[in-house]
Every structure is written in structure tokens, then in C-alpha cells.
Amino acid sequence: MTEDIIFPDRNSLDEIEEGDLLRPKFDEKGLIPCIVQDVENREILMFAYMNKTALQSSIRTGLAHFYSRSRKKQWKKGEQSGNFQRIVSLQIDCDQDCILIKVKIEGGASCHLGYRSCFFRELGDVSEKMDFKLNFIEREKVFNPEDVYKKNN
């Protein structure tokens, strides 16, 4: 097994906010949020969390790895569906507590429900008269999740 990537310590605020070294800040559960964006059209594809191991694996392999809070384990995007996310760019925000990865999707979808993006609906009315109605902005699925994940009932 390849040795773990050791991230530099988070020392001064200047080093964190304007320094030139990756010094990620994981929360009290050991997680850091990650936004995933299509490198070509800039569409936001999904949001997930990474733990230290998932971030290390993502950097080491060039493929997106995440941490599932519900399953309490690391997973590689596409390991079941074949819809891998090849990392083209990894960016971190000013506080180094949120990651943005720009990816090329191998397989055409990012959502486990079969849609290209996990953000396939939008709120129809953003006002105080809002009725909570969601409009589908993406109607066609790239794949049938029941076929891909062989769901057991």
C-alpha cells in the first residue's frame, strides 16, 4: 500500500489564508465538504464529503473518492456505476475548509439516481409566497439505477 500523504500543519492564519501549501481543515468528525464541477461546462454535479483518506486517495489516484456519512466508509465515485470522475483540478477555499474539484465524468452521470447532476431540480418560486414546488431542470436519466446498483427489496 502506498504511504499516506501527510498534509502540512495548520499554523498561522497567514499560512492558511494566503500561503502556498495545502493545509485542509477537517471538521470535528474528520470531514471536509467537497463541491464537484464539470471542468468543461462548469455545471455543479454534486456535493459530498471527504475524510483525510478520501482526499489522499483522490490526490494519489486522480479519481474522486469521498466519505459516506450514512455508510461510514470511503468510496470511489464510479466503483459500482462506472461513472468515474477524473480530477482535472483541485481547488481549496480561502479558509482551506472546503474543496472544489473540477472533473471529467467517465460515463456521463454523477447522481446515484441516474441523472447527470445531483442538482436536477430547482425551487420554482423564490419569494414569500413560495409553495415548495420543485421543477425538474433535468428530465432524462443517463442510466437506470436499478439496473446499475442491482437494488434488493
Image (tube, rainbow, N blue to C red):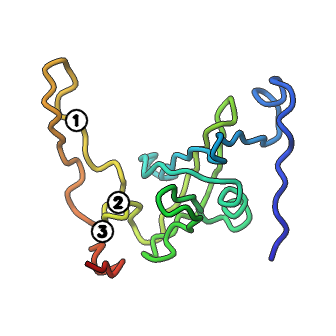
Q: CA distance from mark 3 to mark 1?
A: 23 Å
In the rendered image, residue 3, in percent from the top left (x then y), is placed at 85, 68
Mark closest to the chain's N terminus, 3 or 1: 1
- The residue positioned 69% from the left and 36% from the top of the image is 96
- The residue positioned 78% from the left and 30% from the top of the image is 16
User: Which residue is under mark 2?
Assistant: 116
* Three-letter code, disc 1: Leu
Q: From the viewer's perspective, tell me whether residue 117 is left or right of residue 144.
A: right
Depth order, front residue of 116/111:
111
For the residue carrying disc 2, how many other residues have a C-alpha within 10 Å: few (<14), some (14-19), or many (20+)? many
Q: From the viewer's perspective, tell me whether residue 16 is left or right of residue 37.
A: right
Q: Quadrant of the C terminus?
A: bottom left
User: Which residue is under mark 1?
Assistant: 123
In the rendered image, residue 122, in percent from the top left (x then y), is placed at 25, 40
Marks 2,3: beta carbons within 8 A? yes
For the residue carrying disc 1, how many other residues have a C-alpha within 10 Å: few (<14), some (14-19), or many (20+)? few
In the rendered image, residue 45, in percent from the top left (x then y), is placed at 42, 52
Height in image: 15 above or below 150?
above
Label number found at residue 142: 3
- The residue positioned 15% from the left and 37% from the top of the image is 133
Q: CA distance from mark 2 to mark 3?
A: 6 Å
